[in-house]
Image: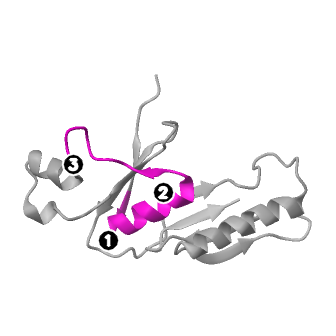
Amino acid sequence: MPARFQLVIDCKDPELLARFWAAALGYVLEPPPEGFATWDDWRRDIGLPDSELGIGADSIIDPRGDGPRIWFHVMPDAKVVKNRLHLDIHVSGFPSRSDPLATRMQRVDAEARRLTDLGATLTVVMSADGLDHYAVGMKDPEGNEFDIN
């Protein structure tokens, strides 16, 4: 049986990234555990100190239950080096190339515009003459790299 896992992303502002990535991936903010009105109520119940309260939404889940839970872990240190792991968001039909390259490029560019409107930054366009592949590199609102292809 495969292991269950969650993806953990260190950040300064968990709620900002939770909302960004929920919108980017079609996820939803994870509701507090049953019996608790807020995450702070749950955090108090398990004995966390007041310094751990007030974080707001810090995790997202796939509403269909297929994808992993993603938790945004508060870390005071700023990101200083390139990610060793990043997400690829597939919108072009990747890896299938059944649609023309121009169509796939339009899908990638439309998604890049949508995510830019949500706070992402476009960093690089990955394309070359004669190459039947198109992708863009981006950064989320805290500078974590990801690609759209």
Please say whether residue 60 is one of the residues in the magenta stretch.
no
For marks 1 and 2, give the CA distance.
Answer: 17 Å
Residue type, numbered disc 1:
Lys
Check disc 3 and report its element: helix, strand or loop.
loop
Residue 98 is situated, as x and y percent measured from the top left of the image, at 88, 47
Mark before the other along the chain sequence, 2 or 3? 2
Looking at the image, can residue 55 be seen?
yes
Contact between labelled residues 3 and 2, with CB atoms less than 8 Å apart:
no
Q: Nearer the viewer, residue 113 or 149?
A: 113
Can you tell which quarter of the image residue 142 is in? Answer: bottom left
Looking at the image, can residue 84 be seen? Answer: no
Q: Is residue 12 magenta?
A: yes
Residue that extends furthest to the top in the rendered view of this protein: 1
Q: Earlier in the sequence, mark 1 or mark 2?
A: 1
Q: Residue at x 47, y 65 (%)?
A: 20
Q: Residue at position x 90%, y 71% from top?
A: 129
Residue shown at the point (9%, 62%) measured from the top left: 50
Q: Nearer the viewer, residue 95 or 40?
A: 40
**Towards the viewer: 141 or 30:** 30
Give the residues in magenta: 9-36
- Residue bearing the label numbered 2: 22
Residue 37 image label:
3
The quarter of the image holding the C terminus is: bottom right
Q: How many marks?
A: 3
Q: Which percent across, then down, holds residue 100? A: 91, 56
- Binning the other alpha carbons within 10 Å of mark 1 as few (below 14), some (14 to 19) or many (20 upward) gives some
1 or 2: mark nearer the eye: 2
Task: Assign a secondary structure to mark 1.
Answer: loop
From mark 2 to mark 3, how far is it between C-alphas?
21 Å
Toward which corner of the image does residue 112 lie, by quadrant? bottom right
- Location of mark 1 (residue): 12
